[in-house]
Every structure is written in structure tokens, then in C-alpha cells.
Amino acid sequence: MLVTFYGAVREVTGSMHLISTESDRVLLDCGLFQGRRRETAEKNRVLPFDASILTNVVLSHAHTDHSGRIPVITQNGFTGRIVCTRATHAACEYLLPDSASIQESDANYLNYKTLRTALSQKALPLQGKNEAAPDSNAIKKLLKKGRHELNVETIRGLMAQLRLETVKPLYTQPDAAKALTFFDPYPYRRTVEIGNQMTCTFYDAGHILGSAISMITARKNGRPLRVCFSGDIGRFDKPILNDPELVFAEEDRDVDLLIMESTYGDRMHEPVADLKGQLLAVLEETLRRGGTVLIPAFAFGRTQVLLYVLHELYNEKRLPRVPISVDSPLAVNLTKVFAEHPEVYDRDTQTTFLSKGQNPFQFDQIRFVRSVEESMALNREDKPQIIIAASGMCEAGRILHHLRFKIHNERNTILIVGYMAQNTLGRRIEDLGRAYDQSGRRGEPPTVKFFNKDYPLRAHVAKIGGFSGHADKAEMLRFLKQSNLRIRKIALVHGEEQQALHFAESLQGEGYTVMVPRRGETVKVG
């Protein structure tokens, strides 16, 4: 049995690893790369193998850096199944179409910019006539429907007529709908055939709803060979979900290769018990300034944990009475998915909310924003409030529009509650905000560029690491030491190079055999 590492290798996005036997090719995850537009576009569009060779895909969880390239393989010859947990399937029914919508919107906007520039620079033949280049207002009127909607059909027609290179989306919403027909969900601890003498059993990873540790077993000459894929390992004692599984079935205990995440391999989070106090401190300080707390958060997982903690503060009568808006149609839908799967909630959630007939994610101060018009009105509001909006790394979505209106005002706070990958807008805001604070906020504020414009970062930037859905270094060590697994070798993935190498060194000091693979590297199992 061979394992080849294709994504999330010495980086944290694009999770993808291929298990090969004499008769089967099983892919572990099929995630999107995130980061610099040109670099990630090339990575996402080109598969490192022919999709038709794949037998099946085992999906650890629904986050798009693990699932977001599934429509790419299903439109390029894949005929197998996407094996996952039931909650992961339910989440992907919203996440994949949303990802497709973002791909389409990004492509349409880039095409609009290309055509607008071409029309404004010189006279171009339109409709077979030589016409002077129109002014900017005339161009906008031609290429837009109203103020905000692009006239996509006109843009496509003019680009074809003028022979301009067109950007195509990675996949479309119909492609995402097709991909969802390949999903084959199962409960935890159910053993499923995924190839010839190859099975998979899911165990709870505790990262997000439905996240799984995948135990892959293949047989060669009657001997079992076992690869355990951790996916993303969750934190212990966090709200809503059960802890990562530590007790595995006897037949799954002997692991030849553990493919393990290392996102926080060199650092520790704040204790989970401190989350409420830290969040409350940021809220109170910002609201005293008369500002808005703007929270970029992943629509799936982080948003629901925030709502849970805010609800606890509300019930304890400690939450300041200001409006709280969840501005993400996707987050609204995924919160429904959470509500539909109480079977995976931990005991505290059952006791704190469900036993009292309360929805953990809904209370009086919460407003769920769906329409563009509501979101635009929220942008313009200049009053103390709390806004939770996607995307979590500030790379797309409504969070960008809120930043455009709030980032320049020192009364406001941008509260970071999750991991910001390298080369994302969120990471730039985090790093620049930290440096500005360390300088005593003296001198001109740093600037960040998005929407093709530079914005001064006068808003305060705060970070609460305890909200992370990823285990920190100590918690990953706890998983290794307290689980009943017997592990021969560990391959560290899903961590930037510094984190992965640091964690590898720590594990070697604990007596583990560890490697940090490079992209395209293959290891033999057994």
C-alpha cells in the first residue's frame, strides 16, 4: 500500500492524499487551496492525477479546504462514491453550492474588470462600428444592472466580440449539484467497504459537526495494513461537540501510518474555560468606545460556537444589550444543520440548553441577515453592535464589505477568532494590527488593500485563540498519548512548515517515528 501526499503538505489548505493498492485508488479529502489568487487558481484547476483512476473518496469533514475540489473531480471522470458522515453530507449540501457561487462571482467580477479596463483605455470596435471609448459612467451603465448587479450576458458577449481572455469559474452551481449526487454518508463506527478488501470506519474527531478520524484498513496476503487519517482534530472540553475520540475498537488499534494534522504544532491556545471572559472583555471595551465588534468567522463551526458562548453570556445577564447580526446566508443554513444533529452534542449542551427547551444558537438579541439589502443597510449603521460575517479568512463574502465601512474607524474592533492562513487578507490584518499595537499605535496606521483600494487600519485588532476548532500542541499530544492506538509511524500534514517541523521534533523527543512529507512524496505502508 502506497500513500502519496498532494495537498495540505507543509501548508494548511488543499487537503488531499492518495492511498494506492494493487486494485484501488482511494483519495483522502479533496480540498481547495486558499491564498494568493493566481497561485491558488493554478493549484485548484490542475489535478495531480486523472480523476477517473479513483475508486472512491473518503471525506474527513465539510470545510472547503477539505471538500471544495470535489466538483472538480466529478466533472473530470470520477465515478466512485464520496464516503463521509451524515452531518458532513448535510453541511456539504450548502457549502459546495456556496463555493460554486463564489467561484462564479469571482470570475464574473474579474471579467468585468478586464472589459472595463479595455473599454476605458482606447477606442474599440463595438457592434461592428468604430466608436470612441466611452467614459467611465457610460461603461458602468453598459456593464451593470443597477448599482450592484453585473450584466453578465453583456460582459460575456462583448469579451467574445473583442476577443478578450475570459476567466472561467473553477466550477459552477450545476457542477456542485452534480457532485452532491456522489455522496454516500454513514454514521460513526460503521465499517464501510471502500475498495477491494479495503474498509473505512469513522470516529469522532471533535473538530466540527460531522468531522471524522478515518480508519482505513486494507488486507495484503491476509495481513491488515492500516492508515489512520486524523482529518482536523478538535479541542477538548470546547462547547457543543464531543471531545476527539480516544477509545478505538480493538481491531483498529494497530496503526501502520497515522496521517496527522499539525496546524498548531508550535503553539498553545488560551484555555477553553477563559473564552467567555475574554470575549466579554473585548465586547465591553469596544462598546465603551461606541464602536462595532466585527468578527470574521467561518460559517460552519466557528459561527455556531460564537452564538453558543454569546447565548451563555445572555442567560447569565452579562451580555451588553446591543444588536448581534449574523450576516451570512450560508451561516444561517448551516446553523440549521447544527440544530438538526443534536445526537452529536456533548453532555453540557444537552444540560445547558436542550433540557430547558432552548435552541443553543438563538436568543432575543440575534438577527440572522439573509438579503443583500439587509446586509447593505447593516454596513451603513454607525452604532454599537456586534457583526459576525463570513468568510473566516476575509478572502471573500460579506465580511469584506463590513471591513470597507469599519476598518478606518478607531472606535471599532476586528476580532479574530480563528486561524488565518498565510497570504490571506485576514493574516495581513492580524499581523499589521499586532505590529501597530506593539508600536503603541503611534504614527500613521498601516494600510491593507482589498477591492483594489488601500484602507487605513485604524480599527483595533484583537485575537482570541481559544475559539479555534483545531487542537493545539498539548491537545494533539494528549490525543496521541491518551488514545489506545498503537502507532508505528506518523506523517504530519495540514500545518505550515514551521509548525509541522516543530511538532515533528517534539514528537521525536517523545519517541515517535515521524516524517514531514513534501508535496508529491510517496511512502510505502507495510
Image (spheres, rainbow, N blue to C red):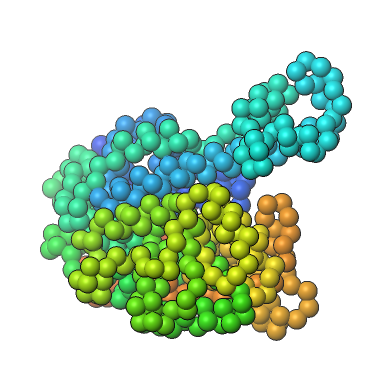
- 454 or 363, which is in the foreground? 363
- 484 or 351, which is in the foreground? 351
Question: Which residue is depicted at the point 18% across and 68% down?
Answer: 247
- 365 or 268, which is in the foreground? 365
Task: Using the rendered image of the protein, determine whether residue 209 is visible from the camera's viewpoint.
Answer: yes
Decide: is 97 above or below 158.
below
Residue 135 appears left or right of 192? right
Question: Which residue is depicted at the point 43% across and 75% down?
Answer: 466
Task: Using the rendered image of the protein, determine whether residue 422 is visible from the camera's viewpoint.
Answer: no
Question: Which residue is depicted at the point 51% across and 60% down?
Answer: 389
Residue 12 appears left or right of 361? right
Q: Horizontal and vertical percent for residue 186?
A: 21, 48
Q: Residue furthest top?
A: 128
Question: Which residue is depicted at the point 34% across and 61% down?
Answer: 208
Tally of numbered discs: 0
Residue 41 appears left or right of 82? right
Q: Horizontal and vertical percent for residue 172?
A: 48, 35
